[in-house]
Image (cartoon, rainbow, N blue to C red):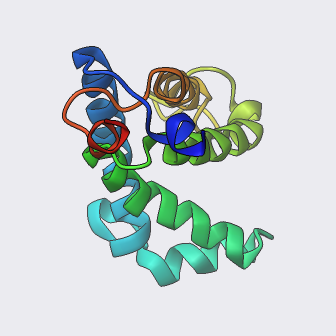
Amino acid sequence: MFKKLLFNTDDNLTSFIVRATLALIMLPHGAQKLLGMFGGYGFKGTMNYFTSNGTPTILAFLVIFTESIGSLLILFGFTTRIWAAMLTVIMMVAISIHGANGFFMNWTGTQAGEGIEYHLLVIGINIALLIKGAGRWSVDRQLSK
């Protein structure tokens, strides 16, 4: 039963498109945190940032791991539901932090910080993957057969 809940998916092209989109959006964020790419602080800098702001070390590590390795595993469609659930939790925490900045992203640079619209989009994508699974061209599909 656990295998069915975790890996079950169909050959749906739409699920693949949603999965690939999520991975391609989240991978650069993970690369910033893990590797310091795209102007990020890398693993040590990100860990220092999170823990200096009161985030427990294990949670800071899980954010970095989920956004980088988890996003890569979503791209391959392996244990997609686990990583989609983890990203949903991360985005819910982000909403609690960014909620004070309103709804919209800080396109003009005039807000105190980013709003929550990006996080809501990612949560919506994650919920679709939690319901439908990884879809076509996924490891999950191969394992569910």
45 vs 128: above or below: below
Q: Which residue is drawn at 57% across and 28% down?
A: 123
Quarter of the image where the C terminus is located: top left
Kindly tell me whether residue 100 is visible in this rendering.
yes
Rendering quarter of residue 87: top right
Name which residue lies at 69% across and 75% down: 58
Residue 56, quarter of picture: bottom right
The answer to whether residue 59 is above or below residue 119 is below
Residue at (45%, 28%) from the top-left corner? 108
Q: Residue furthest right?
A: 54
In the depicted structure, whether residue 113 falls above or below residue 15: below
Q: Is residue 22 left or right of residue 103?
A: left
Quadrant (top left, top right, bottom left, bottom right) of the N terminus: top right
Q: Where is residue 126 in the image (x, y as percent from the top left)?
A: 51, 30
Q: Nearer the viewer, residue 17 or 26?
A: 17
Q: Can residue 84 be seen in this view?
A: no
Of 138 and 72, which appears nearest the observer? 138
Percent x, y of residue 100: 77, 33
Residue that lies at the very extreme toward the bottom in this rendered image: 44
Quadrant in the picture for residue 97: top right
Q: Which residue sits at x=44%, y=39%?
A: 7
Q: Position of residue 133 (x, y in %)?
A: 43, 29
**Residue 46 location, x and y as percent?**
53, 73
Q: Report whether 82 appears left or right of 60.
A: left
Vertical placement of 9 versus 43: above or below? Answer: above
Q: Which of 46 and 13 is in front in this view?
A: 13
